[in-house]
Amino acid sequence: MEPLKIDEILLSTGGELLAGDKAQWICGISTDSRQIAQGQMFIALKGDKFDGHDFIDEVIKKGVSALIISSNFQFPISNFQFPISIIKVKNTLIALGKIAADYRQKFQIPIVAITGSNGKTTTKEMAGTLLSKKFNTLKSKSSFNNAIGLPLTLLELNNTTQAAVVEIGMNHVGEIKYLAQIAKPTIALITNVGESHLEYLNSRANIAKEKAQLLEAMDGIAILNRDDYYSNRIKFKGKKITFGIHHQADITASDITQDINGISFKMNYRTYKTYSVTMPILGLHNVYNVLGATAIACAASVEWELIKDAYQELKTPYGRMGLHSYGDVRIINDAYNANPTSMKAALETLKQIQTRGRKIFVMGDMLELRHFTKSFHQTVVKKAIESGVNILFTIGKESARAAKDAGQQGVTVYQCETNEEIITKLKKILAPQDIILIKGSRRMRLEEVVEGLK
């Protein structure tokens, strides 16, 4: 982050200066009292399970230069020595967003924003790798895609940054619009529109409307998935780059093959460039992520030669179709999160992989599906049977309920109460050449099963 004056913070937030000097400089902004550094500003956020105001004494002892506090917090100014600048605002979270929005406007560089029901983080990581071949590129950390993570990412921009790629998530109506107005991207990609967040939005059509809000805040290039029904129906009057496998698009993949070692295909850029790609990555859905990342690089004017030479460096983040081998047993770790679309995509990958052993599926509940919960879990179990799953482990009441009759289809079913129980039973039954797919929603913490099997 480049230094900011308190005066600039006041202009952004409309806050009231309780103490300190408008001409004072800060060298960074943090919302985490554990990681705050001397000379930085601490913004005291309040969540359901924490209140940053409880740590004000701690951050002052660490040498912060400034504080942003909520107007309903009674701050005992007389107890502290200054020059610590103290700014009072109505809502500290909104203040963080306003500061980041104004700060972002200082940088006239490519800012890429990615949203979608599946593939956001993987596409972001891949796009960051491709962009870095030409630019000093900032990427958002992990899944820093909400009203806290996105502003903090943008506040990491500095005078050496030449491009940035951020992820924008969603749980509620209006969230993407709010975050997009902060980021003001010059390039925006919608990976797809799936069934995630139906708990709040009721239909995929409503989800598509929310995703489209990203484009409303943008003056630049939109990137859309031609194979995704709802993404393809999103209207955008500006410049577009499209990608797909089954429909005509600017960037396409053809001749796709997959085995346990990864994916191979031909990358086709419009009508005049074709390149053979082989990557140590599993999953047809990851071809879409590569296509999206390629479209981003093209939109940012990265030369084709630089793009194609970087494909071997692409990888998926931990917990997203990662392949682990332990002796003669292989594990597909897709435990980071799950919704019906990503579940079916992972099972399709399992179906395509040839093995002399058994195919084992560890299925955790999918959350946030509201009244669609029962039918979607039944659909996933049906897909598991069609994919040749021999043994099905379930954890969570919805997965267990959906798998109740799977035994009649020749599948051995273990209904487990804890991840530890899954680990124990798996260790007893595993045999050489078995392959295990592990997937469930984030709160199921199925990465514990992956780690337990090591």
Image (cartoon, helix red, strand yellow):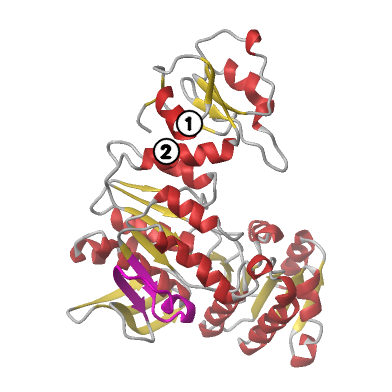
Which residue is under mark 2? 155
Q: State whether residue 315 appears in this view.
A: no
Q: Residue at x 39, y 86 (%)?
A: 246
Q: Specify whether 190 is left or right of 415.
A: left
Q: Position of residue 197 (x, y in %)?
A: 62, 66
Q: Nearer the viewer, residue 310 or 380?
A: 380
Element type where label 2 sits in the image: loop
Identified at 52% across, 53% down, the residue is 143
Q: Residue 9: horizontal and vertical position, in percent?
A: 44, 29
Q: Is residue 223 magenta?
A: yes
Query: Which amino acid is tagged 2?
Result: Leu
The residue under the point 34% across, 42% down is 105
Rounded to the nearest angstrom, the CA distance separating label 1 from label 2 is 8 Å
Mark 1 lies on residue:
29
Which of the 4 image quarters holds residue 433? Answer: bottom right
Crowd rating for badge 2 (residues with CA inside 10 Å; few <14, some 14–19, many 20+): many
Residue 416 position in % (x across, y down):
81, 68
* 48 within the magenta span: no
Q: Is residue 210 left or right of residue 74?
A: left
Work out whether residue 51 or residue 284 is closer to the camera in this orientation and state it: 51
N-terminal of the two: label 1 or label 2? Answer: 1
Mark count: 2
Q: Which quadrant: the N terminus? A: top left
Q: Dots 1 and 2: beta carbons under 8 Å?
A: yes
- Quarter of the image for residue 420 reads bottom right
Identify the element where label 1 is drawn: strand
Q: Is residue 373 visible?
A: yes
Question: Which residues make up the magenta segment?
Answer: 222-244
Quadrant of the image containing the C terminus: bottom right
Q: Amino acid at mark 1?
A: Ile
Compared to 297, does 345 lie above or below? Answer: below
